[in-house]
Image (spheres, rainbow, N blue to C red):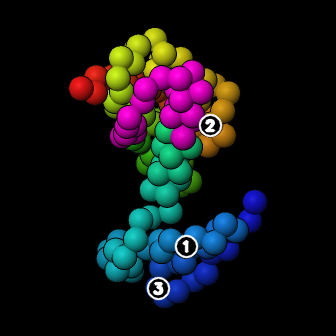
Amino acid sequence: MKVRVKWVEEVSFLAQSESGHAVLMDGPPEGGGRNLGPRPMEMVLMGTAGCSAYDVIHILKKSRADVRDCVVDVDAERADTEPKVFTKIHLHYTVTGKDLKPEQVERAIKLSAEKYCSASIMLAKSAIITHDFVVIDAQ
């Protein structure tokens, strides 16, 4: 896997993926940025949530669950001093589907956290990662 990050101006960077996608990352105005894109550390959290959501949907669909939606809200804390690594990360899943069983959703989240989601497993080396979920029945 390869990516390329190119400095654009001040603290703005254009990240390009090997798969041909790009995203602009920027800093806050107080740090010299223009707030034109997410911060790099926000990208880490977005990638982690995306990785885990992908796993959860894939696992549920593989078990023939009628899953219709999955939203992952992430709340994280960082160390006060440099390097300001994540110290706590909480992922809250809202999974919507027809007749979804909570134990089925819980199993999918656990498999993602312990076996499949490379991003969260990597971050768990330095941060305490917790999960919870809500199942919403689609009518």
**Label 3 crowd (10 A; few <14 / some 14-19 / many >=20):** few
Q: SS at mark 3?
A: loop
Reading the image, the residue beneath label 1 is 22
Front-most of 56 and 7? 56
Q: SS at mark 2?
A: loop
Q: Classify residue 121 as left or right of residue 66.
A: right
| The residue stretch that appears in magenta | 54-73
Q: Earlier in the sequence, mark 1 or mark 3?
A: 3
Reading the image, the residue beneath label 3 is 10
Front-most of 99 and 110? 99
Residue drawn at x 45%, y 46% as measured from the top left = 78
Mark 3: amino acid: Glu
Which marked residue is nearer to the observer: mark 1 or mark 3?
Answer: 1
Quadrant the N terminus occupies: bottom right
Task: Residue 56: say if magenta.
Answer: yes
Residue 19 seen from this side: yes
- Quadrant of the rendered image containing residue 76: top left
